[in-house]
Image (cartoon, rainbow, N blue to C red):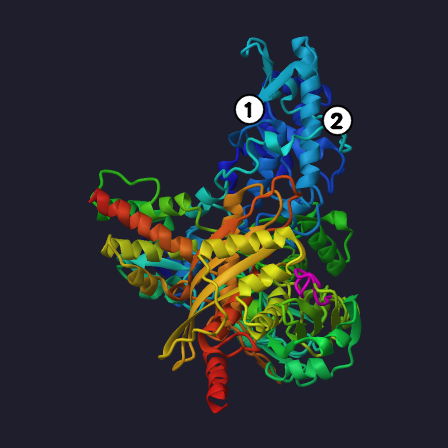
């Protein structure tokens, strides 16, 4: 949120603003305390931000501060990325404290201030971020009640709290004291150990309800400070210089020669080099943009990359590291005894994070620490990586998180952060670096391509009796292009390895009772593929696309409605819950898929599917239209259901579901990283197509609330189901199966042509 | 060279090369937070502003081409709305901005500068757009977070409110 909407003393920049609070609000006593050197509230507050973190995880003060005006600051370790997690985390804290939403606020993540809760990834904000906050808030409430008991002369057990006002139960507010009066800006100095009682879900007043997102008003008004907005006096603008589109992993960006004279005509433009890293700086941003485009660099070419159409065949031929992920019963033997066996191979593309805002960071080297404003998903990891690139102790680097745009996994935020750090260190001046669109799309750590071979068998009664999934992909990188370049490392030796991402057993048939099932992951070496990393719902669209089409084929084989078939085979009431919720919302009419195919150029179909990431439960129904002449698929309506245990704020999850399902349409119908021998060729929004406004379906999200189950992730768990439901709807409409996505008009026409020939 | 342009009702003089895209002047020289860089190629719409009430891409508009046109950014939208609707004073927010809050439409909100500018352009022409008109009008503005359905609802809600108010 914008600094302007926080009280000035709560701004992230520690000491200066906090001491102003002492002067403005704390009054004489605090200044006297300051003069005497006693540990006062103002001092304790000012100390936040003065030294490098992370602060003590077990200290209540790490998570919460109670202010004299009876408000609280909540310090979280999870970044707001547009998912609304700050609102959800505030609900959790306010619930346990018995405060109102209007009394609590968060500050941005900062390695000098906020706790280290690792990356804001894998939909973990509530799932893994909330428990510590809840425990700290419960301990804080216990401490405040103990103090209130002393203050009011009663046992803590006879007290009740509403909106941070503690009163004696049954007295109608006769004796009362506020949190602010009890603690106002002084530290708790207590640790939590998880034994302080937390509220029973049945007593929740905020959790499970729908308070509005705290960040939206300023975002709408144009008052929210994004990382892109920061400007400081004396600042230079920087741009990275990279080949247009990466070549194979391991080739990197290695300059053979750099012709500095080629930008001599651009005012103040200067080349910055560190190892193989090349960048330019200039006083004016447009000059930096022009210099980056004009700088003549000869790059090392390396091995030819191949192309995006042949990558699946290459994955399947490569020498792989094979891991059996799930293995029960005798799938091979039972396959022979099945009444019907269905199976096919599938091809799934590389896709890009493609953040709408190219990554941007501002590094300021003029103070005691190198201070970097960064749109990272993990401030402490970014600090470590910057320190490594520059050869500095971590404590000399301070990362302050500022939101850019939705990033959906490891887009180029580490690169932008490190590039700014390098250029600021080399020039001794603050440098703001913004990636250009082609840098971001051309040097992303892409969601890896995937090839699959699926086979499953069913008996005559409609029970799935055997299931086999073989998946091929390469692993993920853990370094960034900029750090590899600056340290002249190929990156390959630091890659996570072939097996760093394996086929997800949850997404490949685990939702069904299958007594004979084997899932095998084939990890290819990473050299000379594209850089890979986690992209929202990592590979789950691919797994669901292959697996749930196979399940649908079994239903057709036994002439069953796909919903009835799934109900019969599902082994868990929570999977059943989301399936029922989605088909109810969609008013599903039972039928055998493809049995009512329409005639004419434009045909309609409906499909259903299940899917998730690692936790939570997702189901989706899709209604689509296929134009048999043009090959264009239009998704008309989507219905999704998600069970993520205790949903802290159903409105946040519904909004996330709408976004996930639209992004899933985009990915299954349109998105594909393209490349040829010379590198990636999808470098802008015309070559890397995403779903456009005119193409969007109506979306109905349904949250299946389970208040007594632990909260699990909600940011990516209905994407696989959506993609597969669209694929199944395509079969329903046309009687043809698509074995490859994105399901572009060219591929659709080719598939339909094959049908006409047979 | 010194160039004077009219932004949000005020004449602003800046020292910039004539080929500098308007976007960089708005963000760096005038320090406005509305328009923002998305692609630099006029493909996404995050840099959109109004020029005499017509949406343009500031990333592909050289400052020397702006001329006498009155530029309105997100910051100036409520005032422009008041002027267009002959209101005595500018509201805090354009009705579309309020609708975005009411619908809890956005995720990251990066594209909402452009969505707001483009949606407001449509609403300045008609307060009863059809769904097809909205889809067509907004099609040049991308949203990576997938919030299109709620942008649609917000435009419809704002249109309904505006036509009720006359």
> What number of labels is visible?
2
Near-viewer residue (A23 or A528): A528
Residue A202, position as x, y percentages in the image:
60, 32
Could you tell whether A603 is left or right of A181 in the image? left
Residue A697 versus residue B69: which sits nearer the camera? A697
Q: Horizontal and vertical percent for residue A419?
A: 64, 62
Horizontal side of residue A630 vs A245, given as left or right: left
Q: Are marks 2 and 1 in contact (CB under 8 Å)?
A: no
Please state the chain letter of the residue tagged with numbered disc 1 in the rendered image: A
User: Which label belongs to residue A649?
Assistant: none
Callout 2 crowding tier (Cα within 10 Å): few <14, some 14–19, many ≥20: few
Most prominent secondary structure in the magenta stretch? Answer: loop
**Is disc 1 placed on a helix, strand or loop?**
loop
> Image point 68% across, 52% down: which residue?
A119
| Residue at the image position 72 percent from the left and 76 percent from the top | A337
Mark 2 chain: A
Which of A497/A359 is in front? A497
Residue B79 in view (yes/no): yes
Nearest to N terminus: mark 2 or mark 1? 1
Crowding at mark 1 (Cα within 10 Å: few <14, some 14-19, many 20+)? some
**Magenta highlight range:** A501-513
Report the residue marked by disc 1. A163
Q: Secondary structure at mark 2?
A: loop
Of residues B127 and A72, the one drawn nearer to the viewer in this rendering: B127
Residue A168 lies in the magenta stretch: no
Which residue matches tag 2? A189
């Amino acid at each position: 949120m914008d600094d302007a909407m926080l009280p000035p003393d709560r701004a992230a920049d520690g000491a200066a603003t906090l001491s102003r609070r002492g002067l403005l609000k704390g009054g004489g006593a605090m200044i006297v305390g300051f003069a005497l050197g006693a540990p006062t509230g103002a001092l304790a507050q000012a100390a936040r931000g003065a030294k490098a973190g992370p602060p003590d995880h077990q200290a209540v003060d790490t998570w919460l501060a109670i202010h004299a005006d009876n408000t609280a600051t909540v310090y979280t370790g999870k970044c707001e990325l547009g998912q609304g997690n700050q609102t959800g985390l505030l609900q959790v804290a306010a619930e346990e404290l018995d405060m109102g939403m209007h009394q609590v606020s968060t500050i941005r993540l900062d390695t000098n201030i906020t706790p280290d809760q690792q990356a804001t990834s894998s939909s973990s904000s509530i799932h893994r971020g909330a428990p510590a906050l809840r425990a700290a808030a419960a301990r804080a409430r216990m401490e405040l009640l103990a103090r209130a008991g002393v203050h009011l002369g009663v046992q803590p057990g006879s007290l009740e709290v509403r909106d941070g006002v503690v009163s004696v139960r049954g007295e109608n507010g006769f004796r009362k004291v506020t949190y602010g009066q009890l603690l106002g800006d002084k530290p708790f100095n207590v640790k939590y150990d998880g034994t302080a009682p937390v509220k029973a879900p049945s007593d929740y007043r905020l959790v499970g309800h729908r308070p509005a997102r705290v960040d939206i008003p300023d975002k709408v008004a144009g008052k929210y400070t994004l990382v892109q907005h920061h400007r400081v006096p004396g600042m230079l603008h920087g741009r990275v210089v990279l080949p247009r589109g990466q070549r194979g992993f391991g080739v990197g960006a290695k300059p053979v020669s750099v012709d500095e004279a080629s930008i001599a005509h651009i005012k103040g433009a200067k080349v910055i080099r560190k190892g193989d890293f090349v960048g330019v700086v200039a006083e004016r941003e447009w000059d930096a943009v022009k210099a980056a485009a004009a700088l003549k660099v000869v790059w090392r070419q390396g091995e030819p990359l191949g192309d995006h159409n042949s990558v699946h065949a290459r994955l399947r031929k490569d020498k792989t590291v094979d891991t059996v992920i799930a293995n029960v019963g005798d799938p091979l033997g039972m396959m022979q005894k099945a009444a019907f066996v269905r199976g096919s191979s599938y091809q799934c593309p590389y896709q890009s994070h493609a953040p709408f805002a190219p990554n941007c960071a501002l590094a300021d080297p003029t103070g005691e620490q190198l201070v970097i404003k960064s749109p990272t998903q993990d401030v402490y990891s970014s600090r470590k990586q910057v320190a490594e690139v520059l050869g500095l102790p971590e404590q000399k680097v301070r990362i302050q998180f500022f939101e850019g745009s939705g990033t959906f996994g490891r887009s180029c935020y580490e690169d932008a952060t490190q590039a700014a750090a390098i250029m600021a260190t080399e020039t001794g001046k603050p440098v703001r670096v913004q990636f250009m669109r082609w840098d971001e799309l051309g040097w992303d750590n892409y969601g890896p391509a995937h090839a699959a071979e699926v086979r499953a068998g069913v008996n005559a009664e409609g029970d799935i009796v055997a299931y086999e999934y073989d998946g091929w992909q390469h692993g993920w990188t853990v370094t960034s292009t900029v750090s590899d370049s600056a340290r002249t490392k190929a990156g390959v030796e630091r890659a996570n390895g072939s097996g760093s991402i394996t086929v997800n057993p949850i997404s490949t048939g685990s939702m069904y009772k299958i007594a004979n099932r084997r899932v095998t992951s084939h990890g290819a070496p990473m050299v000379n593929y594209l850089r890979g990393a986690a992209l929202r719902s990592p590979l789950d669209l691919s797994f669901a696309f292959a697996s749930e089409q196979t399940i649908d084929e079994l239903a057709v084989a036994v002439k069953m409605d796909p919903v009835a078939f799934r109900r019969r085979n599902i082994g868990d009431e929570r999977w059943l819950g989301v399936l029922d919720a989605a088909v109810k919302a969609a008013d599903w009419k039972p039928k055998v898929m493809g049995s009512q195919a329409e005639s004419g150029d434009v045909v309609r179909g409906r499909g259903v599917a299940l899917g998730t990431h690692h936790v939570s439960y997702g189901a989706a129904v899709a209604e689509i239209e296929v134009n048999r002449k043009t090959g264009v698929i239009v998704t008309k309506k989507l219905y999704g259901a998600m069970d993520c245990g205790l949903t802290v704020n159903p409105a946040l999850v519904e909004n996330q579901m709408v976004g996930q399902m639209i992004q899933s349409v985009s990915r299954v119908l349109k998105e594909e990283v393209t490349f040829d021998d010379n590198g990636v060729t999808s470098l802008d929004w015309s070559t890397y197509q995403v779903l456009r406004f005119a193409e969007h379906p109506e979306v109905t999200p349904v949250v299946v609330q389970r208040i007594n189950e632990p909260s699990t992730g909600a940011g990516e768990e209905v994407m696989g189901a959506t993609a597969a439901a669209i694929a199944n709807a395509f079969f329903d409409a046309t009687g043809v199966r698509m074995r490859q996505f994105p399901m572009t008009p060219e591929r659709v026409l080719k598939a339909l042509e094959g049908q006409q020939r047979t | 060279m010194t160039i004077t342009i009219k932004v949000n009702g005020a004449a602003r003089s800046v020292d910039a090369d004539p080929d500098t895209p308007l976007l960089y002047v708005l963000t760096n020289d005038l320090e406005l937070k509305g328009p923002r860089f998305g692609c630099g190629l006029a493909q996404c719409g995050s840099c959109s502003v109004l020029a005499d009430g017509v949406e343009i891409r500031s990333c592909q508009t050289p400052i020397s081409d702006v001329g006498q046109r009155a530029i309105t950014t997100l910051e100036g939208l409520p005032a422009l709305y008041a002027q267009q609707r002959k209101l005595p004073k500018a509201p805090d927010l354009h009705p579309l901005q309020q609708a975005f809050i009411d619908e809890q439409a956005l995720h990251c909100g990066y594209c909402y500068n452009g969505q707001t500018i483009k949606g407001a352009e449509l609403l300045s022409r008609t307060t009863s757009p059809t769904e097809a008109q909205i889809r067509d009008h907004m099609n040049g503005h991308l949203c990576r977070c997938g919030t299109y359905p709620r942008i649609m609802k917000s435009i419809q809600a704002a249109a309904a409110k505006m036509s009720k108010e006359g």
